[in-house]
Image: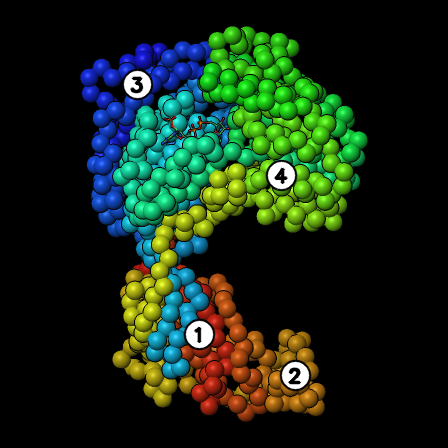
Amino acid sequence: MSTSTVTDVLPSYACDEWWTPAGDAKGTPVYDASTGEVIGSVSAEGLDLDAMINHARTVGQKNLSELTLHERALILKQLAQYLQANREEMDRLNLTTGATARDGMIDIDGGIGTLYTFSSKGRRELPNSNVIEEGPVEVLSRDGSFLGTHIMQALPGVVVQINAFNFPVWGFLEKFAPAFVAGMPTIVKPATPSAQLTVEVVRQMTNSGLLPKGSLQLITGSARTVIDHLDYRDIVAFTGSASTAHALREHPNVTRGGVRFTAETDSLNAAILGADAAEGSPEFEAFVKAVAVEMTAKAGQKCTAVRRIFVPKGLKGAVVKALGAELDKRGKVGDPRVEETRMGALVSMDQLKDVRGAVQKLVDAGAKVAYGTPESADDALVAEGGKVEDGAFMSPVILDFEDAETPELHSVEAFGPVSSIAEYEDTASAVRLAAMGEGSLVATVCSNDPEVVAEVSKGIAGHHGRVHVLNRDTMKTSTGHGSPVPHLIHGGPGRAGGGEELGGVRAIKHHMSRTALQGSPDMLTAVTGVWHTGAEQRLAGDPEFGGSDKYRHPFRIPLNELRVGDGFASGLRKATRQEITDFANTTGDTFYAHTNDEAAEANPFFPGIVAHGYLLVSWAAGLFVEPKPGPVLANYGLENLRFITPVGIDDSVRVTLTAKRITPRVTDEYGEVAWDAVLHNQNGEIVATYDVLTLVEKENTTYKD
Ligand code: NDP
C-alpha cells in the first residue's frame, strides 16, 4: 500500500464484504504525513449506508444476541491476541500517519490493551447471560408478591463511530470493545488522514474469523449522511472538533428522532503546579516531565494533551527553563522512520496549517513565544536525516501569557505540540483558571500537600472528566496525565463534548437499555435468570420447613444441571449458653454482649446475652452443608451479610439456602454459584441474610458418586 497511487481506493467493509467504489472513482487522497507521498485514497461514493445499517440491526444484532456477555467478552481477548500476533503492517502504517513507534504504543498497544481489559472486566463483573439485572429489588406489595427491578440489554440498533484522526486504532477499539460486549454491532468511520491504519485493523479483525457476521463494518470515506439513516435504537459516538459535533448534534434525527449522540471534542486540559512544589522538589521535576511528555507524544495531537500550564506566582521562568531543557531532549522532530527522531509529524499539512493558525491567534491575543519556532520546524530540533521540508513537521512551542485571564488562553486549542503557561495568585485562583476551559477531559494537580490537592481536585472536578494527582509517590507509577485507562471514565463536560466513554462496565452499560420490570417473583426470575425471594424453590431437607426428599441436596448437583431455585431447608438448632461461651473463649471475641449478662441486658438492641453473628453464620454452614466430596469446589466468600434479629440463649435458628445466580465460566470447567441464605429463628423471624459464593464444577468430574 505504501507506493500505491491515488487510484488505490482504500476499501470499506460493508455487509461482511470488502467494497470499493465502482469505476474510476478517485476519492480523497491520504498522504504519508512525513513525506507528502500519496498512499491511497478514501471514497464512500455509492456505498449503501441503508443496507449497512440494516445489516447491523438484523444480522449483527441476531448473531451477537446468540452469545452471552461472557462469550462476547472472551472473543475480545482472542481478537486482542490475534491483533498482537499480526501487527506488523499496523506498525508500518502507524509510521505513515506521522506517529513514532513509541506513539504507536499509545495507539496500537493502547487499543489492544483496551480489548483485554474489557474482556476481563466483562467476564469478572457481569453475569454470563444476555440480561443484566440492576438491583436492588424493590418490594412493591406488602406480601412480597409484586416486585420491581431493572433489566439492561443491548440497545437494538447499531453504534456508528465517527472518529478523529489522532487515534486510528485506540479511538476505534475503545469504542468497539464495550459495544461488542454489550451486544451492539459497530460501524466505524475513521477520519480521512489516518484511515489506512483503521482499515488494516479491521482487515486483521475480519481475517481472524472471530467476529460474528454483521458485528463490525467500516466506512472508509466521507459519511456525511449517515445520521439520516439512524433512529432512537442507535448510537453515534463522535470524536473530533467541537464545530462538527455541534453540527451533528443538531441533526433532526438527534434532536427529535432520539439517536443517542455522544461526543468527545476539543479540550484545553490544564496542569496545575501546587504552591508547595518549589523548584528542585520532586513534584516540580515530575510536573515538568509530565508536561513535556504531553507536548511531544503524538506531536501533541492528543485530546488529553496539556494545553494550559498554571504555576504559582514567581515560578514561570523556572518552569519554562526546565521544560525547555526537557523538550530539547524529547522534541527532536523528523520522519518517524529515522532513528534519531523523538517526535513525528502532525497528521497532515492541513493540520499543520490549523495549528500554526491557532498559535497565531494566541500570539495575537497577547502570548509571547517562550520556547520554539511556530512558523517552521526548529533547525536545532530536527533529527539527523529527518527531512522536514515535505512533511507536516512542527517543533514544540511554549506560549507565555502575562495575563492568565486572557479568554483565548482558555478557548483556542492548538492541536499540536503547543502549550501555554501562566501564573496564578493562590489556590482558589488556580481552580478558577482551570474551570475557565469551560469543560475539559483531564487536569493534573501536582502537589505533595493534601490540602492543596483536596481543594483543587474538589474545586475543578465539576469541570473535568478526570483529575490526575501527581506527587513524589506516583511520579514513577502514574499511568500518565494523557492516558485514559479503560477502567476509568474518559470524557468531559462542556467544550469536551459532554460524553462519557470507558469506565469499566459503565461503558458496556452505555450500550444497553435500562428498563424497569415489575411482576411476581416467578416472572422476574424467568426474565432475569436470577432467583428472586418468593419465586418457586425446589428444596431438599426438612419437610417442616419446605424441604422434600424428592430433591437432591443442591451440593450434589453439578453446575450444568443446577437451576436457580434449587436449594436446601434445614431444621432448627438451639443456641445454648455453653456454646456461646465456648465460641467467645476459643475465638477471643469476648465482647460483653456474648459474655456479660448485665451489660448485654442494658444494651437496647439485645434481650440479654446473644450468639455472635459469626457463630450463627458458622452454624448455618453446618446446617446446610453436604459433607461428601461433590461438585462444590470452594466457598470464596459471602456478600451482603446483615444480622437482623438477635439470637439469645435457648433461641433456635434454621437456614434456607437457594441457588440464586449461576454463572458458568466460559474458560473453565467450573462456574460460580451465588446462594441466597436466609436464617430464621423458631418464630419464623428473619435472623440474618447473605449470599454464599461458591465455585461449582460443571460436571461431576473431580469426585464421582
Ligand atoms: P473533524 O471534526 O473535522 O472530523 C472528525 C471526524 O468527523 C472525521 O471522521 C470526519 O470525517 C468526520 N466528519 C466531519 N464532518 C462531518 C459531517 N458533517 N458528518 C459526518 N462526519 C463528519 O475534526 P478534524 O479531524 O478535522 O480535527 C479538527 C480539530 O478537532 C483538531 O484540530 C482538534 O482541535 C479537534 N480534535 C479533537 C479531538 C479530541 O479528541 N478531542 C481529536 C481530533 C481532533 P472526514 O475525515 O471524512 O472529514
Residue at image position (53%, 10%) is 388
Residue 131 picture location, percent across and down: 34, 58
Q: Which residue is mark 1?
A: 677
Q: Nearer the viewer, mark 2 or mark 3?
A: 3
Question: Mark number for residue 436?
Answer: 4
Question: Mark number for residue 27?
Answer: 3
Say if 376 sits above or below 84 in the image.
above
Residues under numbered marks 2 and 4 in contact, where contact means CB atoms less than 8 Å apart: no
Mark 3: amino acid = Gly
Q: Callout 3: few (<14), some (14-19), or many (20+) C-alpha neighbours within 10 Å? A: many
Residue 190 picture location, percent across and down: 37, 29
Mark 4: amino acid = Met
Q: Indicate which disc, 2 or 1, sits on the residue closer to the N terminus.
A: 2
Mark 2: amino acid = Ala
Q: CA distance from mark 2 to mark 4?
A: 57 Å
Q: CA distance from mark 4 to mark 1?
A: 53 Å
Residues under numbered marks 4 and 1 in contact, where contact means CB atoms less than 8 Å apart: no
Residues under numbered marks 3 and 1 in contact, where contact means CB atoms less than 8 Å apart: no
Residue at image position (31%, 46%) is 257
Q: Indicate which disc, 2 or 4, sits on the residue closer to the N terminus.
A: 4
Residue at image position (33%, 42%) is 252
Q: CA distance from mark 2 to mark 1?
A: 25 Å
Circle 4: element type? loop
Which quarter is ligand 1 in? top left
